[in-house]
């Protein structure tokens, strides 16, 4: 399991407690909800990919996500920057 730590300034902490009874609960809920949405997106894309390829679909949602050939946001950023640099180079050549 991954553990993340966040540091808030005193002003940010005060502002968070204006909208949330528990800052920790609010952050846990926000992160878990975003992860739930990403899991649903990955599973839907992977199920569609497997159906199109005539492959069987097995396992839990977690199993499907862990086996899915997806790019992380960091990997996608590196790829896109490389593609953009290549396009600029081709256009300037």
Image (spheres, rainbow, N blue to C red):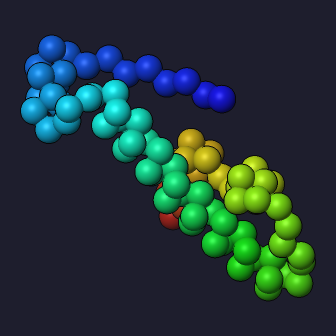
The residue under the point 47% across, 44% down is: 32
Q: Is residue 15 shown above or below 37?
A: above
Q: Residue furthest right?
A: 55
Q: Residue furthest front?
A: 21
Toward the viewer: 89 or 7?
Answer: 7
Residue 84: x, y in percent?
Answer: 52, 56
Q: Residue at x 73, y 74 (%)?
A: 47
Residue 78 in the image: state x and y as whole percent: 58, 45
Residue at (89%, 76%) from the top-left corner?
Answer: 56
Task: Please indicate whether residue 60 sits to the left or right of residue 34 in the image.
Answer: right
The spot of residue 18 in percent (x, y) is 10, 33
What quarter of the picture does the C terminus occupy? bottom right
Q: Of 36 and 70, which appears nearest the observer?
A: 36
Residue drawn 64% across the image and 72% down it: 44
Count every numbered label the image shows and give the total.
0
Side (left or right) of 21 relative to 82: left
Q: Is residue 74 left or right of residue 51?
A: left
Residue nearest the viewer, comparing 23 with 21? 21
Does residue 89 appear anywhere in the picture? no
In x, y percent, where is residue 30? 37, 44
Query: Which quadrant holds residue 87?
Result: bottom right
Quarter of the figure with the N terminus: top right
Residue 41 seen = yes
In the displayed structure, would residue 10 be above or below residue 33?
Answer: above
Q: Is residue 72 left or right of residue 35?
A: right
């Amino acid at each position: 399991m991954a553990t993340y730590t966040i540091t808030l300034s005193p002003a940010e902490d005060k502002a968070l407690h204006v909208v949330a009874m528990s800052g920790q609960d609010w952050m846990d809920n926000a992160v878990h909800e975003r992860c739930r949405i990403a899991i649903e997106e990955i599973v839907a894309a992977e199920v569609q990919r497997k159906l199109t390829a005539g492959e069987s679909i097995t396992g839990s949602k977690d199993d499907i996500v862990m086996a899915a050939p997806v790019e992380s946001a960091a990997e996608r950023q590196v790829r896109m920057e490389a593609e953009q640099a290549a396009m600029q180079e081709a256009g300037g050549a």
